Amino acid sequence: MLGDRLREMTGKDLDLVLTDNGTTMISVHTGVEKVSVRLQRMFLEAPDDIIAEIAQFIKKGKGKTPLVRRFIKENGCRIRRRPRRLKLTTAGRYHDLLAYYVSVNREYFGERINAEITWGARNPANGVRRRTLGSYSAASNIIRINPVIDKRNVPSFLVKFIVYHEMLHADLGVERKGGRRAVHTREFRRREKLFRDFDRVIAWEKRWISGK
């Protein structure tokens, strides 16, 4: 997978996020412990010399990238343009959605999910029912997480599971059975249970909703 190749070539512990961004093709942020890299999805099909140049750019944090620029120019038609850029908010008061997204994408999806993620609008009327905690829009390719779970007493494994649940929707899409849409299919439910803390999540949700 591309993330593993870049980690091997750079010798760095990096997190990779694939995007459909139409303006920023490569973004590198060097943190204290990790390097965060965002790449336009077109680079999944880039040849070895392009990936090598990207790896050098990540290692040095600067430098000329003529091969990358030429590849972008030649493959600009692959970029999906969005008429309007939504402002995304991933850092909550207690939970960082982007960190969870990157971790889940690497562990369960081989870093192939390229959806955007954001906290939804705050609404005091929102309840804590299971179905209200997250949503995925295929039209915009955006995952929205209900900010009602951005609380100190909500464990990170629960928020990660909600993120994982919506990423499953992005990965599996919608099936049609007898002319009806089916989103929570048998395969969806099977994969949902692969989440490492699935049993803890279900037990915690039941206590939370019941108020115990």
Image (cartoon, rainbow, N blue to C red):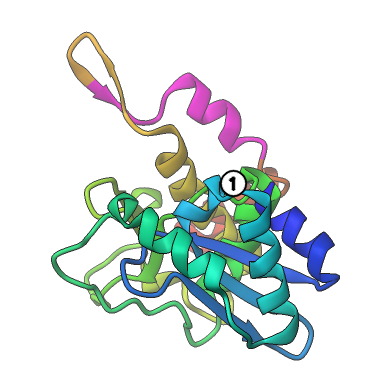
Where is 71 relative to 55, above or below? above
Magenta segment range? 181-194
187 with respect to 117 (left or right): right
Residue found at x 39% / y 72%: 148
Q: Position of residue 25 (x, y in %)?
A: 44, 70
Quarter of the view holding residue 129 = bottom left
161 with respect to 121 (left or right): right
Q: Position of residue 108 (x, y in %)?
A: 65, 45
Where is 171 relative to 32, above or below? above
Image quadrant containing the C terminus: bottom right
Residue found at x 45% / y 64%: 70
Does the magenta segment cover residue 182?
yes
Amino acid type shown at disc 1:
Ile
Residue found at x 67% / y 57%: 49
Q: Position of residue 183 (x, y in %)?
A: 34, 31
Of 131 and 139, nearer the camera is: 139
196 with respect to 163 (left or right): right
- Badge 1, how many Cα within 10 Å: few under 14, some, many 20+? few
Does the magenta segment cover residue 47?
no
State the SS at label 1.
helix
Of 101 and 205, nearer the camera is: 101
The residue wearing badge 1 is 202
Residue found at x 51% / y 23%: 187
147 with respect to 109 (left or right): left
